[in-house]
């Protein structure tokens, strides 16, 4: 089977791809170690915005940096891309919520899980990396 080469994506390309999706994986560290959970999100400029309830995830965000990962894979064509954002998270105070929402591109993230999700979080990137499966490469393994 022919294999594809990997193409590194620029920061602008990464944010353009993030803007096309609505679900990503929040990666954080809690008392049990690393965890990754899906969240609905939107972009506010280059900030990644999601909502949550109080709990272990929010407690962990207050103590450590986070990562956020989004990808798209097409198994039929053996193509796809992946973007990884590493950065800090901050809870948005109620009095600043209107300003945040005015910067959100597209839809406002609505959690799928039942409950009251009063905590708004913004992830600010320290680093953004992305890769895309590009053109087919010559076979060179074995």
Image (spheres, rainbow, N blue to C red):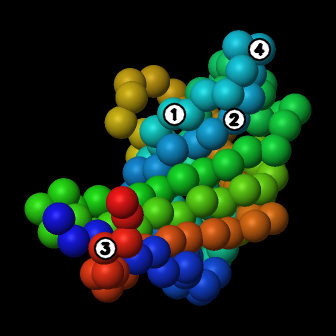
* Nearer to the camera, 118 or 16: 16
Q: Which of marks 1 and 3 is nearer the N terminus?
A: 1
Residue located farthest toward the front when viewing the structure as drawn: 142
Q: In this view, does 7 lie to the left or right of 79?
A: right
| Callouts 2 and 4 close, C-beta under 8 Å | no
Residue 43 x, y percent position in the rendering: 55, 67
Between discs 3 and 2, the one toward the N terminus: 2
Q: Image quarter for residue 56? A: top right
SS at mark 2 in the image: strand
**Sooner in the amino-acid sequence: mark 4 or mark 1:** 4
Label annotation for residue 31: 4
Q: x%, y% of residue 12?
A: 59, 86
Placement of 66 over or under 58, stated as above or below: below
Residue for badge 2 = 28
Helix, strand or loop at label 1? It is strand
- Residue pointed to by mark 1: 37
Q: Mark 3 or 4 closer to N-term? A: 4
Mark-to-mark CA distance, 3 and 2: 37 Å
Q: What separation in Å lies between label 3 and label 4 (alpha carbons)?
A: 44 Å
Residue 52, horizontal then vertical, whole percent: 58, 34
Q: Nearer the viewer, residue 29 or 90?
A: 29
Residue position for label 3:
139
Residue 106 seen by the camera: no
**Labels 3 and 2 touching (C-beta < 8 A):** no
CA gap between label 1 and label 2 equals 9 Å
């Amino acid at each position: 089977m022919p294999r594809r080469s990997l193409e590194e994506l620029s920061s602008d390309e990464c944010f353009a791809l993030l803007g096309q999706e609505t679900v990503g994986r929040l990666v954080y560290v809690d008392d049990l170690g690393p965890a990754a959970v899906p969240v609905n999100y939107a972009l506010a400029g280059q900030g990644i915005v999601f909502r949550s309830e109080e709990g272990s995830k929010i407690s962990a965000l207050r103590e450590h940096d986070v990562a956020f990962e989004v990808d798209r894979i097409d198994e039929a064509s053996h193509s796809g891309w992946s973007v990884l954002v590493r950065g800090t998270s901050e809870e948005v105070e109620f009095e600043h919520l209107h300003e945040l929402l005015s910067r959100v591109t597209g839809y406002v993230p609505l959690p799928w899980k039942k409950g009251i999700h009063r905590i708004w979080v913004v992830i600010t990137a320290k680093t953004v990396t992305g890769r895309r499966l590009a053109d087919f490469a010559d076979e060179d393994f074995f």
